Amino acid sequence: MAKQKTALIVGMAKSGIAAARLLYQDNYRIIVNDMKPEIKGLFDQLSGIAYEVKLGANPMDLLDGVDLLIPSPIIPMTRNFIVEAKRRGIEVISEIELGYRYSKADFVCITGTNGKTTCTALTGELFKAAGRKTFVLGNIGVAISAHALETQPGDVVVAETAALQLEGNVRFHAKAAGVCNITPDHLDHFGTMENYIEAKAKILDNQTADDYAVLNWDDETVRGFASRTPAHVLYFSRKTEVETGMFVRNGMLVYRMNGEERELMPADEIRIPGGHNLENAMLCALLALSQGIAPETIREVFRTFAGVEHRIEYVCTKGGVDYINDSKGTNPASTVRAIEAMKKPTVLLLGGYDKHIGFDELFDAFTPIVKACVVLGDTKAQILECAKAHGYAHLMHTADTFRDAVDKARDLAESGDCVLLSPACASWDMFDNYETRGRVFKEIARAYE
């Protein structure tokens, strides 16, 4: 009888829970570890499986006898216990790699700095509308490992794949892969922009000449990814009529594939607003077309898809003020896109966890539509200094708590204005994740008279 293998799972958030449950079903001995000495609800989430709990322990001390190590995506691959595990011959993979290995479905994947959640949700709707059994998984909020064993040949996994997840991939293979854009993010984790770009590029690893890569022509870095894959490359562009892919001509989405040019639909019929969402729509359309989905199906979905939670999401109107939740705006480039989508004078909520990214890009993009900012969190001082350097100190107000920040934004707004939560920062200084931050914002706003 074969020796039972041991898996060490470090970090017990969603992906760690899903990995533990999946590997238990494959008869692994499970060791769960986290830097926190106590995790509320952990035992309920792991009910029905056998495992050893090593909360608060140093993972370096847990490597003896381990065959497989799955670290949380927020843990850099340069950490000493991961380096030591590899030196000992322990296999180290990401959770999405694990889920991929146990799945029987085709993978259609999206990555990029901004827009990937919207693209993942929209692409999922396209495949569902086409009658394909579709699982929308990954960084969008549901671990691939949680549903890998449910998949069958012919099914589709539409996966949002963040750089933090991709760096631990080995055999992961996207039949179709889309890259939205690349701007600075997660430099606290990767150290350099070059390392971040390399992690993003891993979405193209293991592609073949039968696969498709959908790339943003207008982003020079992403355009350059074409040299990294043997797959068929399709470009999308708001600025250029690309030779193969999709572009805009006289307000119409046009695509060129297999030597033919066809019109898809008028751009202004796409329900989700903003120039960035036009790019997102083109990426999704090309992924769908590459997999045989009919243009009429794409048109129907584009006319009805309303967007995703926490991404430029209308919450309510109170006292004549619109409240907009863009908690997923976790870097400056993402917040710039949210500002560009605003049509009314806007009070902006900024600040959060420090990912070691500068804010010059954000203030370079300020327009008169931003009438005031309320700043809080770990990055407060950094944002205030950058605002002063760009001549916007007069717009800045500060708060110590999230509730105080939202209340101050309400006080600064007048009837006909917007209050926009788009922090340009991660949430980890105050919240477990951006979803919780967005939900709290919505609860506060909806409770106003």
Image (cartoon, rainbow, N blue to C red):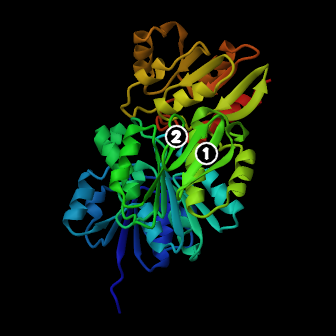
- Foreground residue, 422 or 268? 268
In this picture, is 161 found above or below 348?
below
Q: Is residue 119 visible?
A: no
Corner quadrant of residue 370: top right
Q: Position of residue 346 (x, y in %)?
A: 64, 19
- Label 1: few (<14), some (14–19) or many (≥20) C-alpha neighbours in 10 Å: many
Q: Position of residue 57 (x, y in %)?
A: 33, 56
Residue at (65%, 47%) from the top-left corner? 263
Corner quadrant of residue 310: top right
In this picture, is 243 found above or below 267?
below
Q: Position of residue 135 (x, y in %)?
A: 60, 63
Q: Secondary structure at mark 2?
A: loop
Numbered tag placed on residue 254 in the rendering: 1
In this picture, is 203 found above or below 276?
below
Q: Is residue 296 visible?
A: yes
Disc 2 + disc 1, Cβ < 8 Å: yes
- Residue type at mark 1 is Val
Asked whether, in this view, residue 439 is left or right of residue 386, the answer is: right
Q: Secondary structure at mark 1?
A: strand
According to the picture, the residue beneath numbered tag 2 turns out to be: 241
User: The C terminus appears in which quarter of the rendering?
Assistant: top right
Asked whether, in this view, residue 302 is left or right of residue 221, the answer is: right
Q: Residue furthest bottom?
A: 1
Residue at (52%, 17%) from the top-left corner? 366
- Residue type at mark 2 is Glu
Residue at (38%, 30%) from the top-left corner? 357
